Image: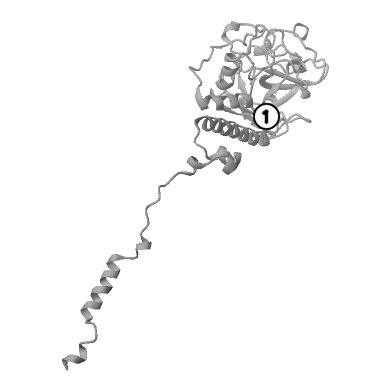
Amino acid sequence: MSGSNSGRPSDDSGDDHLRQDRSGGDPRSTREPRQSTSDSDNVSIENDGVVRWFLKTDDENVLLIRDIVSSVAIVAVVGLLLFGVSGIWPPLVAVESGSMQPHMQRGDLIFVVEEGRFVGDGAVAGTGVVTLEQGRESDYTKFGMAGDVIVYRPNGNAAETPVIHRAHFWVEQDENWVNTKASEEIVGDKTCDEVANCPAPYAGFVTKGDHNAGYDQQMNQGADTGVVKPEWITGKAKYRVPWLGTIRLTFDRLLGGMLVPGSPSSPALQGVDPATIATTPSPASPEIPGPGQDVHLTGVAGIAGVGGVGSAITIDRYRR
């Protein structure tokens, strides 16, 4: 009986062979590990095209250009979004004097909107401006007092630096506004004959800086302008960001208006040394009475500087 099993391999030998196959594995399945390389190391203009190469390469010069382009693009997108809300360009203005203190400070960044947007109760007919006089009646306030703060070109002159002051009241043509609407605390005991622009040569707004002693329409008391016609108004102030406007003013001062040219400065006003004002070099343009210390930034460098340039272009400079 023992011979009947002599021609068959034993079970143990078969199991050993199977285990050997499993332990040895398929030699074809054994592969050498690949050496990993990043896409940026292999990209080239010839194989990938200019666009992909520009976006993927690790070349230091290209990285710098990419950072510059992205910074400018971000500023442009933000500027366009703000323009869509405000309706005017530029939508941001940097204040360069102290005539609206304490409600606005030199170097503040002001978001300005089109006159006809966000109109408050009691606006003058045909305009989107609420005067201080009407704002007191309707309880409408902006920047700490009743009435809108408007941006306008003095005497309608587009070459003048715009002024940002509060609209106090509306006058009709030939109106003796010194007697009918002006505050005695501001004009004192003066009569219409003693005050410039009285009677009013045409209909418009009488304006004043919150920190100024007199109306803009009085000689040597404010912006030294005529009664403000509605068509001279370029916008009205909506929001204030403290000190952020120093970017615009600093670039304007350091680069002398070459990168961000500004409008010629306004005629000289009383009470402040012109040297305290940081604007594009031009004829003397002192501030309205009040504090006017120069604001300095210690330095602008690298990509932050590039973003600052874009911001400076997006931000205009306005006098108060």
Q: Residue at x 60, y 17 (%)?
A: 252
Q: How many marks?
A: 1
Q: Quadrant of the C terminus?
A: top right
**As drawn, 299 above or below 24:** above
Q: Residue at x 64, y 13 (%)?
A: 185
**As drawn, 51 above or below 135:** below
The colour style of the image is: one colour
Q: Nearer the viewer, residue 16 or 131?
A: 16
Q: Nearer the viewer, residue 52 or 92?
A: 52
* Residue 129 percent location from the top left of the image: 71, 28
Q: Residue furthest bottom?
A: 1
Q: Nearer the viewer, residue 243 or 16?
A: 16
The answer to whether any part of residue 134 appears in the image is yes
* Residue 234 percent location from the top left of the image: 72, 25
**As drawn, 44 above or below 23:** above
Residue position marked by numbered label 1 in the rendering:
137
Q: Residue at x 50, y 17 (%)?
A: 297
Helix, strand or loop at label 1? It is helix
* Residue 60 percent location from the top left of the image: 49, 31
Q: Residues within 10 Å of mark 1 (few under 14, many from 20)?
A: few
The answer to whether any part of residue 106 appears in the image is no
Q: Nearer the viewer, residue 46 or 251?
A: 46
Q: Quadrant of the N terminus?
A: bottom left
* Residue 141 percent location from the top left of the image: 62, 29
**As drawn, 159 above or below 314:** above
Q: Where, by quadrant of the figure, is residue 18 drawn? A: bottom left
Q: Residue furthest left?
A: 2
Q: Is residue 110 left or right of residue 22?
A: right
Q: Where, by quadrant of the figure, is residue 218 drawn? A: top right
Query: What amino acid does circle 1 point to?
Result: Glu
